[in-house]
Image (cartoon, helix red, strand yellow):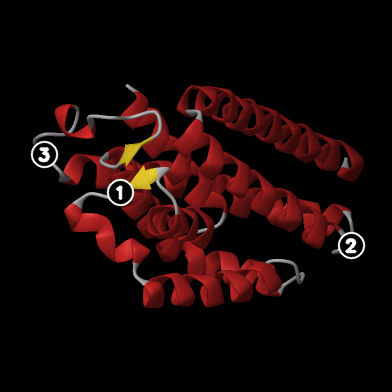
Amino acid sequence: MLEVLTGSGLAASAGLNAYIPLLMMGLLARYTDLMDLPSGWQWLGNGWVILILAVLLAVEVVADKVPVVDHVNDVLQTVVRPTAGGLAFGAGSTSETVTVSDPDTFFSTHQWVPVVVGVLIALGVHLLKSAARPVINATTAGFGAPVASTAEDATSAAMSVVAILLPMLVLVFLVGLVAFLFWFLRRRKERRRERRAARA
């Protein structure tokens, strides 16, 4: 069960920022004993891969904080974030970490399943983020973009750490995301009603 929570947390994290969970896994695998990537995923700990992920993260962090540019970035990331989520779930759920000592027993067959699950989780989080950002930009005249982006990056980093070190807490993050989704959809519906009432 911990494998699923670790993978889910990393995939959800990738839905907010594609590069944070992958970079974190690579750094932890390369420089600490907190994560041991399986043979098929050891490329994440390669120095060049870490450098490329760091550069991509820097670009993403800047682009996501500029109004209008953040929308273009979200469109481009519609492919990147789910892909990163699939990679993060696949690598994270099959890795040996401080909390998971025998990951092979859970995903011994059907190795494509964790990747597909990760893609779906990251895509869901990405779509929620992409839908919320234009609303934030419109209601704050663009000033909310850097604040929202910083909060998303911080959440992505925190969820990545929690997924690896304390996977049981991933449930709290996931429940929070679902609660935010319901609140956001309800608020959107109310705004539409208000607009129709104002026009009438």
Foreground pick, 32 / 142: 32
Q: Are marks 1 and 2 in contact (CB under 8 Å)?
A: no
Disc 1 residue crowd, few under 14, some 14–19, many 20+, Cα 10 Å: many
> Where does residue 117 sit, x and y in percent of width and height?
31, 40
Gap between marks 3 and 1, in whole Å?
Answer: 14 Å
Q: Amino acid at mark 1?
A: Ala
Foreground pick, 88 / 193: 88
Residue 91: mark = 1
Disc 3 residue crowd, few under 14, some 14–19, many 20+, Cα 10 Å: few
Residue, x 40% and y 58% (percent of image)? Answer: 84
Q: Amino acid at mark 3?
A: His
Residue, x 25% and y 41% (percent of image)? Answer: 94
Gap between marks 3 and 2, in whole Å?
Answer: 48 Å
> Where does residue 177 sit, x and y in percent of width and height?
60, 32
Q: Are marks 3 and 1 in contact (CB under 8 Å)?
A: no
Quadrant in the rendering for residue 48: bottom left
Foreground pick, 193 / 168: 168
Q: Which residue is mark 3?
A: 110
Which one is closest to the eye, mark 3 or mark 1? 1
Q: Earlier in the sequence, mark 3 or mark 2?
A: 3
Residue 14: mark = none
Q: Earlier in the sequence, mark 3 or mark 1?
A: 1
Label 1 element class: helix
Gap between marks 1 and 2, in whole Å?
Answer: 40 Å
> Where does residue 180 sit, x and y in percent of width and height?
66, 31
Q: Amino acid at mark 2?
A: Ala
Q: Which residue is mark 2?
A: 141
Disc 2 residue crowd, few under 14, some 14–19, many 20+, Cα 10 Å: few
